[in-house]
Every structure is written in C-alpha cells, then in structure tokens.
Image (cartoon, rainbow, N blue to C red):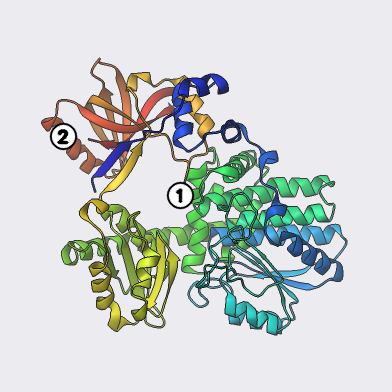
Amino acid sequence: MPKEWRVYSKKADYDALSEKFHINRLTAGLLVNRGLRSDEEIERFLWGGLSDLNDELLLPDIRKAVDIIAESLGEGRSMRIVGDYDIDGVCSVYILLKGISYAAESLGKTASIDYVIPDRIKDGYGINRHIIEKAAEDKKELIITCDNGISAIEELRLAKELSIKVIVTDHHDVRKDEAGRDILPMAEAVTDPKRADSSYPFEGICGAVVSWKLIKAVFERLSLLSEETAGELLFGELLAFAAFATVGDVMELRDENRIIVKEGLKLINSKKGLNLGLSKLIEGCGISEKEITGYHIGFILGPCINAGGRLETAETALRLFLCDNEREAEALSEKLIELNRMRKEMTETGVKEAELIAEHEYGSDKVLVIYLPKLHESLAGIVAGRLRERYSKPVFVITEASEGLKGSGRSIEAYPMAEKLCEVSDILTKFGGHPMAAGLSLEKKDLEKLRKRLNENSGLSDSDLVERGAIDYIIPVSYISTGLIEELELLKPFGQGNERPVLADREISIYDMRVLGAEKKVLRMRLADKNGYNISGIMFGDAEENRERIKELCGKKKGLSIVYYPEINVFNGRRNLQLNILDVL
C-alpha cells in the first residue's frame, strides 16, 4: 500500500546539543526526535551502563518475593516455575531456574525446583486450574509465575485453597474494577511494574527482565554477589537472556531496555553471554561468523524459539538452553530451525489464501475478518499482522479450534481493537487484548455477524487507512559520509521505539536497476542528485515490482524523492557508502 510520509518538526537548539555532547548536529536532532530532552536523558541514552539500571527493589512486592524464596531455599521447600510458551516466557523460566538453582547450590542446599510451560493449544495462555491441581498432586509448596499470572484471579484463588504459596512475576496490564482500581490475584507477592501502586520508574520491561531483577535481588539478599561466579552468571549469561527476550518480545528500546539490550548484545558477541544451546542455535542458523544484532534476534533466532511453542512445545527451546551435551544441543537446535521453516511455509500459504479472500470478497471492508479454517491457530496472529501491513486495515484472522472458532487480530493506530471487541462482546465467548492486538473466541454461527457489526461500528475514515511513516530529516545524499554513519552507531541498538534514522532527499535520478537473489527480493541501483553526485542504493521487497514502479515514476517525473537510511556496505574487504531505500516517490 502507498505510504504517506511526514517530516518530524520537533524543535530544539541542535547546535548547543551538538557542542555540549560532541556529536554531529544531525545526531543531536535525531536524539530530540526520539523524545530526549534533558542532559541526563541524553547522557544515559548515549553512554548509559549497568550502573544506570533502575533499582530492582522499587518493583512492587519484590522484597516479599525475595524473603519467600530465601525462606523456601533455607527450608528445602519444593518449588515450581510456571512460564509461557513464547520467547519471553521461555527466557523468564530459564533465568529463574538457573538463578534459584545457583542460589541453592551456594547455600549448600538441594534445590527441589522444576518448571511447567503451558501448551498453547491444550492449556492456552498462562497458569490454569489443571497446572495448579498438578502442583498440589506433586506436593509443590511454592509456585512462581513468570511472564503470566497477573490476570489469573480465579486460578490463583484455587492455589490459596490448596495451601500453595504463589509469587507472581509478570509485566502485562493489570485488570481493573469498575472504579479503575487494580484487581490483583490472590498471591503472597505480586511483582508487576504496571501495578497502580508501583514506584518503579519504567513499566516497559518484559517478563524476563522482571525475572532477572528478582534473581539480582535474591543474590543480594543472600550476599552472593561477593562471589565472582555469581556475578559472572547474573551479569553474563542471565543478562544476555534478559536482553534476548527484550528484543524477541518487541519491547521498546528506551530507558533501561536500551541499556540491557546494548550490554546483552556485547555479551553474546563476546561469547560471555552464550550457553551451549544458544551457541548451537546461532551456528545452526548460519550466523555464527556475524555480529549478532537485534535484527538477528528479532527475525532469525527469536522465531525459532517461538516456533517450538507454536507448532509443538516450548519445552524444546528450554531444553536447548538447559542442555550441556553438544550432540543433544545440535539436535534440539536443528529441530527448532526445522519447525520454524515449517512455520514460515504454513504462514506463506495462509497469507496467500487470506489475500485472495480479502481482495475478492471483502475489498470494501474497513475491518477485515478473514476465516481460514485450515490455518494452525497459533499462526493466526502472524497472518493478521502480514495482512495489516499490506492493507493498512485492522485485521482479524479466524480459525477452527477444538471448541468453536478462535482468532487473533492486529490493528492500526486509529482502531483501538480491544475496545471495539467490547462492543461485540455479546457474540464472543472469550476475548482480550490491547489497542494494537487482541484475541477472541466465538461460535461459528456468529462469524458473519461479527464481520458485519465490526464494520458497521468501525468509526474509520478513508484517511485512517493510509499507512504513515516518519522522516527524521531531509538530508542531501551528498552529505552522507563514513564518519556520519559511524557516529550514528551511537544510536544502536535499533528496534521498537528506537528505529533506524529515516532520511529523505529530493530531485534524485535512479538508473542501472538490477534484480538480485534467487527469490528476487533485492533491487540494486545507482542514484544521482541534481548536482551529479553518485551513490549506490539497495531496496528490499518484491524487486521486480519495485523496479517496474520506479520505471513508471521516472517516466512521469524528472526528479524523484527517496526515503532512505545510510549504511556502509562491506564486500570483499572494501567499505562503500550505500543507501538502503525505504520508498521512492
């Protein structure tokens, strides 16, 4: 879909910032565009380290949680960790399991601690009655949830009735009553930065970071950080897994998330943050010789971890991380890579089928409700996301489930999805989510009614359905230099909430376009500005479609506008300036 680009217009004294922080004026402007204003914020963004992380003891109930864990270790109580089936849940379980086991060993205790990860299809999200009843049957005295539990009101009431102590660690939104007050689950400690009474200064951390903060507090409470090995574990491997989950769970890379990811990537690339399993996964994905970045976690490694929970069991990924046998680690990593390959094939099939339905049956609908009965229900959200990107519309993808129909939705800024589902709650058997994504269940007989009512009440105008992008600055391509690109490295890691700088230039000529790659996903070109300055460009996507579109534009206009970000292309040891073209107008 065509994109509407707008230029940021945030004002500040860029020259003063440039002089104060010894950075390029463009870099100063980029920091302002990212919402940084005070000297303290800018210094922390550019040069913040582990000493700048927020104090974990500000998390609600964390002192209670630490006391319960310390007491349980001292008395040899049997514990069970209950996680979730995605990358954040798996990493959270790993951090808690490794951290508490290490603490027990340091105290000379035999840790009776194990874990459960719910099955996506059979159990659904989070802790349920069956898991609690099984914990009671197994004589577990303490349950620690991670990346789930904050909304398990009825379930954790059962745990109380069965005399099982519970520590909830989560990062999801807290349910509210009619007066807007928090409804907290019945537990001995509820540690979630999104509690209304939380004094924690940044609520945007993932479940694995909450787990890491809890282990840090446990280690300090037990005076373990005086031991070199405890520090190496906490600030090495466990921190790397917290960073891995932060990127994989698509958290915003600002505040302490940025520091955690920056330091975590350093650890992974120096091998200090790698255990055998993660190392074998990196090797199996063919990226062991590359510098691991947020891109590799978000688009190569993370999807492999999530594929286990989508198509089989998330325990495969956790077993990989816990593995200390090289051959077993290779086998587990190969299994996850193969599951991800299958997931991609199934997704592509689903997307193509959904596009045909959208274009031939519901082209005029502002809210797309697409029924794909044969699609694996774990892929509904991915397919919905792909359709949302293509059509710039809110999308619900509905599949067959064991009881009725089940679906996932992905939204646009103008459509608060969870609110809109409240308006049709009378025909839904279950629903939940937030403004940009939601899940739902319903009976098959109500499917067409759902589509009709969502469209009647969408409140969307045609202008709401135009995809919008933000340009940081209009900068002549001749201004780009190796030094500028190297300075922009200060802004890394890039990702959600800290996107790559987006620049633009006008009156550009494009020529010598070549389609590259077996899948024809790369278009290489030469560009020249109005003064004849030449530079290489590269554009990803459907290369042949992009080439034909640019040819058509060249026939209509004398000079084109380009949206791009600059990079250095290294090939055969040679470094050359290159523009990564995001759009041509």
Front disc: 1 or 2: 2
Give the residue type at disc 1: Phe
Q: Closer to the camera, 513 or 509? A: 509
Residue 34 place in picture, x, y as percent: 47, 37
Secondary structure under badge 2? Answer: helix
Residue 93 place in picture, x, y as percent: 64, 62
Tally of numbered discs: 2
Query: Would residue 139 be visible to someone looking at this image?
Result: yes
| Residue carrying label 2 | 553
Residue found 42% across the figure and 34% down from its top? 501
Compared to residue 326, the image places residue 376 above or below, namely below
| Quadrant for the C terminus in the image | top left
Q: Closer to the camera, 455 or 347? A: 455
Compared to residue 28, the image places residue 421 above or below, namely below
Give the residue type at disc 2: Leu
The disc label shown at residue 193, or none: none
Q: Describe residue 64's horizontal placement relative to residue 264 as left or right.
A: right
